Image (cartoon, grey):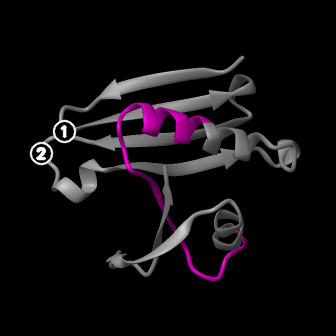
């Protein structure tokens, strides 16, 4: 069973998307009206997780597809995420169509990637 739980934190909305009774999930954050305009054009994908015994079954790709649909329906221009450079995850996100955003830097060394919706 797939579920989406939405929480309004006041300054932003966060959705938890859960697949197959929790074997895969992620969070999708929608910056709010108090955020800078460039942030309001993004939905942020974070904490994408698939239990090890359920990997390589397309669940993570399905989660990203759901996130793309929800972000686009909310009028967002990009689905964005941050990832540690040099990891298999960075290469996987690039294969899915995410592009490095050199204009958006994080202080902890992680890179920001965007997918245009």
Depth check: give the residue in front, 96 or 16.
96
**Magenta residues?**
66-88
Residue 5: % across, % down: 47, 22
Is 89 or 113 nearer to us in this picture? 113
The question of residue 93 being in magenta is answered with no
Q: Position of residue 36 (x, y in %)?
A: 16, 56
Examine the image and state in which quarter residue 12 appears.
top left
Label 2, secondary structure: give it. loop
Q: Are marks 1 and 2 in contact (CB under 8 Å)?
A: yes
Residue 20 versus residue 69 in the image, above or below: above
Closer to us: 73 or 55: 73
Q: Is residue 7 above or below residue 32?
A: above
The picture quadrant where one finds residue 80 is: bottom left
SS of the residue under disc 1: loop
Q: Does 87 appear above or below 22?
A: below
- Residue labelled with disc 2: 34
Residue 83: give x, y in percent of width and height: 54, 68
Per the image, the residue denoted by label 1 is 11
Going by the image, does 115 lie left or right of 25?
A: left
Residue 22 picture location, percent across and down:
69, 29
Is residue 77 in the magenta section? yes
Seen at 62% across and 45% down, the residue is 64
């Amino acid at each position: 069973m797939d579920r989406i739980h939405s929480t309004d934190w006041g300054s932003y909305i966060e959705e938890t998307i859960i697949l197959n009774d929790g074997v895969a999930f992620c969070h999708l954050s929608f910056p709010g009206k108090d955020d800078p305009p460039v942030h309001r054009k993004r939905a942020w994908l974070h904490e994408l997780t698939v239990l090890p015994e359920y990997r390589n079954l397309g669940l993570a790709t399905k989660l990203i597809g759901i996130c793309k649909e929800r972000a686009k329906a909310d009028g967002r221009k990009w689905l964005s995420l941050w990832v540690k450079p040099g990891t298999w995850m960075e290469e996987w996100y690039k294969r899915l169509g995410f592009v490095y955003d050199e204009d958006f830097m994080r202080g902890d060394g992680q890179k920001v990637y965007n997918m245009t919706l």
